[in-house]
Image (cartoon, rainbow, N blue to C red):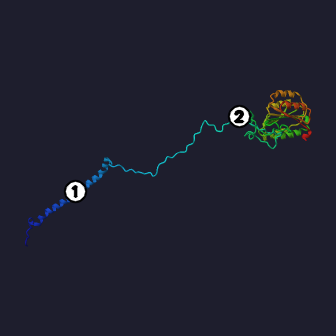
Amino acid sequence: MTSVPPADTTSSPRSTASLPLESSFGRAIVLAWTVSILCHAALFAAMFLMPWLADVVGPTDDLPIARTDLLGELTKARLPTTPRPELTATANPVIPDALELKPQRFERLSQPASAARPELSIIGIGTGGGEDFSKYGLRAGGGPGPSFFGLGQQARGARRIVYVVDHSGSMLTTFEAVRRELRSSVGDLRRSQKFHVVFFNAGPPLEHRPKKLVPATATQKKQFFEFLDTIRAEGSTDPIPAMHRALAVKPDLIYFLTDGDFDPLLLEKLREWNADQKVRIFTLAYVSEAGRVLLEQIARENDGEFKFISEHDIL
C-alpha cells in the first residue's frame, strides 16, 4: 500500500488571494448597515423634536382672516315716532254757561198694574227669606204695596206688616170673609217681607207664634193658616192691648180692622206710642160704620188710609 503525502497548504496560490477580498466585503456591509441605522435614528429624532420645536418657537406667519365684502350701501332705519301730547291743551272745552239741564217729567200712575210686580230691588233678597236690610239703610221691594180688602196698594216699600183684626162676637156671621181675606193678603206677601197677626176682643190678644214678625215664606204662611183656622168670633171689643203689641214689633204698616165702636182712649195712646209717625196705620170699618169717625182720624194722624167694607163688598 502506497501512502500519499499531505498536501502543502502554504504553497497554494488560491487561498492566499481570497482572504483580502472577503475581509473588505464584510467591512462594507457593516458600514452600510451602520450608516442606515444612523440615518433612521436621526430621522426619528427629527420627527420627535418637530412638535416640541413648533410649540417653543411659535408660528412665524399670521393666520389667514376671512373677509366679506358687502354689496350695496347701508341705510339708516328710522322708527315711527308718536307725537307728544300737549298737556296744557284741553280737548273739547266745556263752557259752563252753555249747559242747560232740563228735568224730564213723568206722569204718575194712579194705580200700578198688578201684572208688573218686580220681586226685589236688592240682589240676593228673597232667596233666603227674611233678612232685614232696613238696618243697613236699604229698602227692598219696589212693587205695589200689600193689599188687605183692596187697601194699602199705595204703601209701596212696606216690608214689615202687622194685621190687627177684631174677632169679637159681633163679627160671628161675617168672620169667615175676614178669614178668607187674611189668607189672600198674607199669601200674596213676598219672601222679602215679614208679617204678624194679632186678633183682639175684650180678652188678651191672640197672636200666632213666635209672636213677632216672621218672614213671609211658604213655611211661615202655612203655620199661620193653621193658627187662623183656630180663631173664633166671640166676646166684646177692646183693641188697645192688641195695638200696643202690634207697635212693639216695630212694623212699617199696621192694618186695623174692626166692626164696632171702641174706646177713644186708643187715639190718645197712639199719639204717644207712634209720636214720630214712623208706623203707617191703615184702618178698615168692617160692615158697621159705628167707629168710622174714630177710624178715619187714626188713619189721618198716622199717615194712613181709611176704607169702609160693606156687606156687599164681602159678598
Q: Is residue 243 visible?
A: yes
Residue at numbered disc 1: 35
Q: How many angstroms separate mark 1 from mark 2 (CA)? A: 125 Å
Q: Quadrant of residue 283?
A: top right
List x then y, in percent, for residue 35: 22, 56
| Front-most of residues 178 and 38 | 38
Q: Residues within 10 Å of mark 1 (few under 14, many from 20)?
A: few
Residue type at numbered disc 2:
Asp
Q: Is residue 202 visible?
A: no
Identify the residue shown where x is 84% and y is 41%: 184
Q: Quadrant of the C terminus?
A: top right
Residue at numbered disc 2: 97
Q: Secondary structure at mark 2?
A: helix
> Which is more foreground, mark 1 or mark 2?
2
For residue 45, above or below residue 97: below
List x then y, in percent, for residue 32: 21, 59
For residue 2, above or below residue 195: below
Between discs 1 and 2, the one toward the N terminus: 1
Q: Quadrant of residue 97?
A: top right
Identify the residue shown where x is 28% and y is 52%: 46
List x then y, in percent, for residue 107: 81, 39
Q: Quadrant of the N terminus?
A: bottom left
List x then y, in percent, for residue 19: 13, 62
76 on left or right of 55:
right
Q: Secondary structure at mark 1?
A: helix
For residue 259, above or below residue 44: above
**Res 268 label:** none
Residues at marks 1 and 2 touching, judged by CB atoms closer than 8 Å = no
Residue type at numbered disc 1:
Val
20 on left or right of 168:
left
